[in-house]
Amino acid sequence: MALIITDDCINCDVCEPECPNEAISEGEEIYEIDPSKCTECVGHYDEPQCQLVCPVDCIPLDPDNEETQEELMEKYEKLTA
């Protein structure tokens, strides 16, 4: 499952540089996560780095983009090939 940034985002910019896949970018109103690039840090770290640094806890799993650990690893391998 990819992650999503909710409307609770305060645009503090701490999540963007932590993403190893460059999946986070500044949107019109809040930061956004590109689900095609988000691997929940699978392949890089044991847990999503953006969630660890977010001061307002606004980065949950995206229920519209469910993926298994195997699918996330496949995505990681394609992104880093």
Image (spheres, rainbow, N blue to C red):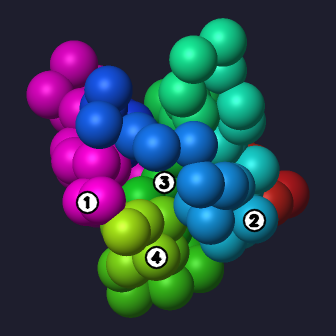
Disc 2 to disc 4, how far (Cα)? 10 Å
Who is closer to the viewer here, 33 or 73?
33
Disc 1 to disc 3, how far (Cα)? 18 Å
- Of the image marks 4 and 3, the number of the one nearer the N terminus: 3
**What residue did someone put label 3 on?**
39
**Could you tell me the amino acid type at mark 1?**
Asp
**Could you tell me the amino acid type at mark 4?**
Val
**Could you tell me the amino acid type at mark 3?**
Thr
Mark 1: few/some/many CA within 10 Å (<14, 14-19, 20+)? some
Residue 18 sits in quarter: bottom right
Residue lying farthest to the top in this orientation: 28
Q: Element type at marker 3?
A: loop
Q: Main secondary structure of the magenta part?
A: loop
Tags 1 and 2 touching, CB below 8 Å = no
Residue 36 in sight from this viewpoint: no
Who is closer to the viewer here, 3 or 39?
3
**What residue did someone put label 1 on?**
57
Q: For marks 1 and 3, give the one nearer the viewer.
A: 1
Quarter placement of the N terminus: top left
Residue 69 sits in quarter: bottom left
Q: Is residue 61 magenta?
A: yes
Span colored in magenta: 56-76
Residue 52 sits in quarter: bottom left
